[in-house]
Image: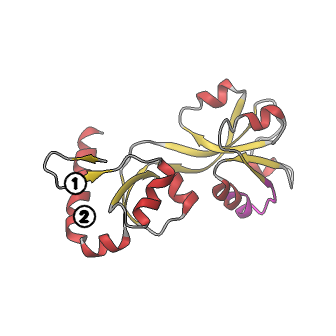
Amino acid sequence: QIEDTTGTAKALLVRAQDVPVYVEYGQAQLGIVGYDVLREKSPAVAHLADLRFGSCRMSVAVKATSPYQSSLDLRPHGRVASKFVHCAREYFNNLDLPVEIIPLYGSVELGPITGMSEAIVDLVSTGRTLKENGLIEIDVLFESTARLIANPLSYRLNTSELHHLVEQLHSSILSTV
């Protein structure tokens, strides 16, 4: 735990995937987490603000030498590797394209390289990692930025204080952008 100099606030440093859990269960009143985590986990939290930093995108990528130019070119029941299983499944279900989602939680890029999968769904910032692994983006599921979230009960009980905090954050962010 980290405490501020006035002793009025404490902060926890936890894994991104755990932020919404701490907030949802009331162990933290507020949290900052990527939109990608919120889409993947669907926690019961109040979404207060898009903080407009940490930009990246959730994308479908394939080997640069593959014939695929869009997700719709993938063959039915093909394999897609991702650590974002829910986001990947939702995306392909919305396309009405049945695929097998292979859960991988590290080096997802190896899926197509080793032949385990035809494609991956992963976060892309600059595209450098994809390029280094001979992969290209063929579709973007959604854009992701850092978001301010709150425990729903804390939000209802402290609405005016939290609105003031959100306004201060927006002012700070706008002055740095």
Pointer 1 or 2: first along the chain:
1
List the single residue furthest toward the left.
Answer: 6
Toward which corner of the image does residue 69 lie, by quadrant?
Answer: top right
Q: Amino acid at mark 1?
A: Ala
Q: Residues within 10 Å of mark 2 (few under 14, many from 20)?
A: some
Picture coordinates of residue 141 (x, y %)? Answer: 62, 52
Residue 9 numbered mark, or none = 1
Q: Secondary structure at mark 1?
A: loop
Q: Which residue is mark 2?
A: 162
Residue 134 within the segment the image draws in magenta: no
Quarter holding the C terminus? top left
Q: Residues within 10 Å of mark 1 (few under 14, many from 20)?
A: few
Left or right, residue 73 beside residue 30: right
Which color mode does the image show? secondary structure
- Residue name at image x 23 percent, y 42 percent: 175
Picture coordinates of residue 53 (x, y %)? Answer: 39, 43
Left or right, residue 87 beside residue 68: left
Toward which corner of the image does residue 176 lie, by quadrant?
Answer: top left
Q: Is 111 above or below relative to 159?
A: above
Say whether marks 1 and 2 touch (CB < 8 Å).
Answer: no
Q: Is 64 above or below relative to 39?
A: above
Toward which corner of the image does residue 163 lie, by quadrant?
Answer: bottom left
Picture coordinates of residue 126 (x, y %)? Answer: 54, 32
Residue closer to the observer: 70 or 79: 79
Q: Nearer the viewer, mark 1 or mark 2?
A: 1
Residue 95 within the segment the image draws in magenta: yes
- Residue name at image x 51 percent, y 52 percent: 17
List the single residue furthest toward the top.
Answer: 132
Q: Amino acid at mark 2?
A: Leu
- Residue name at image x 20 percent, y 61 percent: 164
Picture coordinates of residue 57 (x, y %)? Answer: 55, 45
- Which portion, as a residue range, is magenta? 91-100
